[in-house]
Image (cartoon, grey):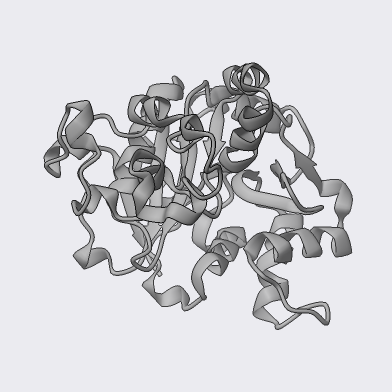
Amino acid sequence: MGHSLDEHSASLRGSSESTPQERLLQVVTVLVGNAYADVYVDRLCQMVARHLRHPHRFVVFADGVSGRRFNSPGIEVRDCSSWGLPGYFNKLRLFDQAVTGPEPFLYLDVTLFVRGDLGVFFDHAQSRPASLVAVHDWNWPVLNSSVCHIRPDGCTQRVWEYWERGERFGRKFAGDQNYIDAVFRHSNPGALSHWPAEWVLSYQNLRKQAARDEAAAQRLYQRARIIKFHGHPKPPEVLAPWRNLSSTIFRHPFQPRLWRYLASEIRQHWIVGPADRARGAPVNRNARDRIGSEIFKA
């Protein structure tokens, strides 16, 4: 299984005990399967480095580690090949202290871009007693697990314990977040809290707002710290709309301005840094839109 986050953090700090002020903040992500190229992790690591001033660690749990290629300095790679969970459900293992250790951490999906200060997420979570702070889903009455702060304790550990013992509450679950939400509703709803709604926005919903009122959408965007790409389009499909016509051009056929909505912002926040250049990603606007390179794997 490898070392837990806490064990590795202790080795970085040395043998002496650290005060709370000296502890590194922890940011965690998961990359399994081949749905997304390794460069998604590089980009996320770079965005975190730009928007989190406090000393921190960036950890990715990935399968097939020997075949992965991460270029950004500071990425700590943990092998999760043995977890054996389907797709999104691998995130449930982050609720197991045997894997993560007892220190709290901020989890981020790889399919988002960061445009504002991440320190506020830690401040917000640490100022509240909630064991889990997550996004309130934009479309469904459940939590969304794309951005969440996990405080390892009995409430969060229960997510993994319930899953491991086969508890399914007599229903099927479409994804990890539905299951996490069900566990908290069943066992301790008071231990779940949500981020302020304006901090993490859905790209799809923001684009819908722009279709109705572009100025209002821009005001929402300016207040957001994270833009999440759930479903489609993903960032490469916004940069090159013909890659997924149904989620871009056909979605708003008479509003061409929405076919590449926020494309310049994606270039600004998402396609930057040495990891992209190391993979041969071009630096000019036109070349960035070329298709077929690994950096555009969606």
Q: Position of residue 37 (x, y in %)?
A: 30, 55
Q: Is residue 284 visible?
A: yes
State the residue in front, 45 or 294: 294
**Vertically, is 263 above or below 79?**
above
- Residue 24 is left or right of residue 295, and the answer is right
**Vertically, is 287 above or below 61?**
above
At x 23%, y 60%, the residue is 68
State the residue in front, 285 or 104: 285
Q: From the image, which quarter does the N terminus lie in?
A: bottom left
Q: From the image, which quarter does the C terminus lie in?
A: bottom left
Q: Position of residue 289 (x, y in %)?
A: 25, 39
State the residue in front, 250 or 296: 250
At x 69%, y 33%, the residue is 125
**How many labels sit on residues?**
0
Task: Farthest residue to the front: give it.
Answer: 254
- Residue 130 is left or right of residue 64, and the answer is right
Q: Is residue 17 visible?
A: no
Residue 254, by quadrant, is top right
At x 28%, y 49%, the residue is 296
At x 50%, y 51%, the residue is 247
Q: Position of residue 24 (x, y in %)?
A: 46, 32
